[in-house]
Structures are given as C-alpha cells and as structure tokens.
Image (cartoon, rainbow, N blue to C red):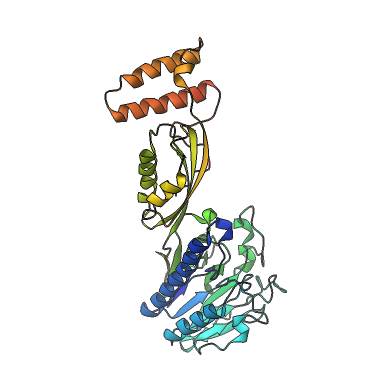
Amino acid sequence: MRLVHTADVHLDACFAGAGLPARAANRRRQSLRDVFQEIVLRAAEWPADALLIPGDLFEHERVTPDTAAFLKSLFDSVRPLPVLIAPGNHDPYIAGSPYAAQSWPENVVIFNRPEWIAVPLCGGRLVVHGFAFDGYEISSNPFGALAIPQDGAIHVAMGHGTERAHQPPDGKSYAPFDAETAFTPGLAYFALGHFHRLTEIPVAAGRWRMMYSGAPEGHGFDESGEHVFLEIEIGEEDLRVMPKTSGRVRFAVHDLDVSSLASAQDLVTSLRRIAAAYSVPAIARVRLKGPCDTSLIGDLQAVKDALANDFEYLLLEDETLPAEDFEELALDPTILGAFVQQLNEEIRDAPDPERRRMLIRARTVGVAALRGHTLDIAGRRGGEDDS
C-alpha cells in the first residue's frame, strides 16, 4: 500500500512575520501553490493509494476564492486518487470555510467533526481514520480514543495536534496528546500535522510509526533547513517512510563578520559564497557584524541590487561597529598597544592578499580578546544557522 503524507502548507500565508515586502510575499504564496501542486501530481503519478493532508492546508482568515478554486481543480485533475483532509487549527471545518461552503470532487474526503471517522479505501484493504478541528480550538480532543478492529485491513490514522514530548518550548498546544495514549494496536501508520519540521514520534510497537511530515516549504527564518513530504510504503512485513525534498527555497540566517573586508566588492563576494552554499535559492537574513569603515556598508541597497540574481530575497542588517584606528591604538603603552603594533607591521609586510586578510582578522580577534569581548575566530557571535 502506498501513501503520500503532507501537511501545514498554509496557502495564502501573509509572510509578515518574515519581514518580506509585498512583492516577495506574493512570490512566496505562489511558491506554496507550486510546491503543493507538485506533491499532489507526484501522488497521482507514483501512484499512491491515498494522499493524506492532516491539517493547515490553508489559512481560513486569509483564504481566497481563487485558492479554493485552485484546490478543487487540482484535486479533480488527479481523480480517482483519494485525497483525505483532516482540518486543523488554521483551517478548521466551520461555517464559511471552503471545506463546508463549496462542493468537492468525489475523490476528496474532508473529515468534518472532532471524532474519529473511518473511511475504507481500496476495496476495504485500506482504512483511513481521521477527525477535524471544529474551531480554532477543537471542542473535543479525540486523541487516545481510536479503536482499531482486527479485520485484516491496513489501518492508518491522520490528525492535527501537539505531541507533548516534542512540543517546541515557545509553541502553543492544539489537541495535545501523548504518544503512549495515542498508540492503538493494529494501526500501521499515524500521519500528523502541526509541527513544521519533519519529526518522528518514537513508539515501541514494531513497525508502527507516527510522523509529522513538516511543512513542505518554510514560512520564515525560524523554519530554515530542508523541507519534505513523505512517501510511505506498507508491505506485509515492513513499512518504509521516504522523505522527498519539496521546498523550492531555503530560509537561512547568517552572521557575517566584515572586519577583514576592504571594499563593497569583498562584501558582495562573501555574500555570494553564502548563496552558493544552498542547492535552492535562499531567502537570507544576513547580520553584518564587526568593526568596519563606514564606506563598506554605505550603500547596502546597491549591494542587495547587485545580488538580485544570487538570492531569492536578501535582508541585510547592519550591526557593525565603527572601525578601530589601529595606528593610534599601536601607540598605546600597553600589552594591547604592543600587540597591535606587531600585527600592523606584519600586515604591511604580508606577501599576498590572503595572508593579509588572515592577519587583519587575527588583529580584530586579538583586540576583542584583550578587551574581554566575545568574538570567535570564525567571526560568529551566536545565532548563526546555515543548516
């Protein structure tokens, strides 16, 4: 039996939290559609026996009639592939929701109440159990109440909620549950939605697996890293879960020490190295750090314009400090002054540009250390995420 599992697409998201301007946000919303469309078409072409979407397919407060029409047309185009949707806290099954307000193709099953409903597929050989949020807060939490009959079918569950042991520290709980109580003998796979990162919830039950697919594409700088959807194969003796890369862009956060850079060209080159580290276009927030001459960061808009083809979007944050007067500092009758004087001489005598850059960097790190400041040798001061 083959399944495709994706969730937390958040069609029509506003991207205000990521600090993106209107044009960039429009591109991101279109990208979410494109990514989701590719997943649905992949499910049909593979072919999967069912596509499982456990919640937050769109955002109810922002969903447009065009998005509803897009989904209806897309799902109709992959008939007879069964598409099963378990509405979550952002797309609850409520009055006015596209789930309730419009008709859907016959291959689409939308769970419509906060209790387990069983849907037999494939002539009864596969049974999918799901439930719906009936508001932004669910009125009755069904986790832990699922019973599986011993009927020889493959049973799969899907739902939106917060597994307590893996909840992010700053996250809010929706339909909270514990893996131990959600476990039901006879269940092969549990498809979850709500966490935006691929997360497996460990269970001590042989091949039985419980997974959050994560969002198929990141929605902000707190969702860096690779994003995937899941293909699942359930055989008589084994169950395989295969993550498939889906994101078309990558959110990334970097700290860039600019103290050893001599010109805006050096800054552009350093930023291009960041862009080149990713296999897909990056939406990058780069915090410029360290002491530097004001001319280096005098026209950051020109730098961003020069890199328009290197990044999907580039946000530069100037956290630099005024450059040190190292010639003046070398006259200081202290260990700090003696250190700077020696490095100044070595920099002047450096045999090549690479050696000179290394010595300039060593001078900056050394001065920071002698003054009791924290600055690691790579120029990072915490918070860097280039995973």
- Residue at the image position 48 percent from the left and 40 percent from the top: 288
Residue 49 in the image: above or below residue 381:
below
- The residue depicted at 62 percent of the width and 86 percent of the height is 101
Q: Out of 34 and 180, give the one closest to the viewer.
A: 34
* Residue drawn where x is 45% and y is 26% of the image: 364
Q: Which of 161 and 318 is in front in this view?
A: 318
- Residue 31 against residue 296 in the figure, above or below: below
Picture quarter containing residue 143? bottom right
Q: How many labels does the image show?
A: 0
Regarding residue 261, the answer to whether it shows in the image is: yes
Counting from the top left corner in percent of width and height, residue 212 is at: 53, 65
In this view, the residue farthest toward the top is 333
Regarding residue 185, the answer to whether it shows in the image is no
In the visual, does 180 lie left or right of 258?
Answer: right
From the viewer's perspective, tell me whether residue 112 is left or right of residue 139.
Answer: left
Which quadrant of the figure contains the N terminus? bottom left
The spot of residue 113 in percent (x, y) is 66, 80
Tell me where residue 276 appears, x and y as whole percent: 35, 50
User: Is 162 positioned to the left or the right of 351 in the image?
Assistant: right
Left or right, residue 306 beside residue 380: left
Taking depth in this image into account, of 169 and 218 the one nearest to the observer is 218
Q: Residue 57 lies in what quarter of the image?
A: bottom right
- How far from the left and from the top, in percent, is residue 240? 42, 68
The residue nearer to you, when weighing 179 against 25, is 25
Q: In this view, does 197 lie above or below 348?
A: below
Q: Which residue lies furthest to the left in this view?
A: 351
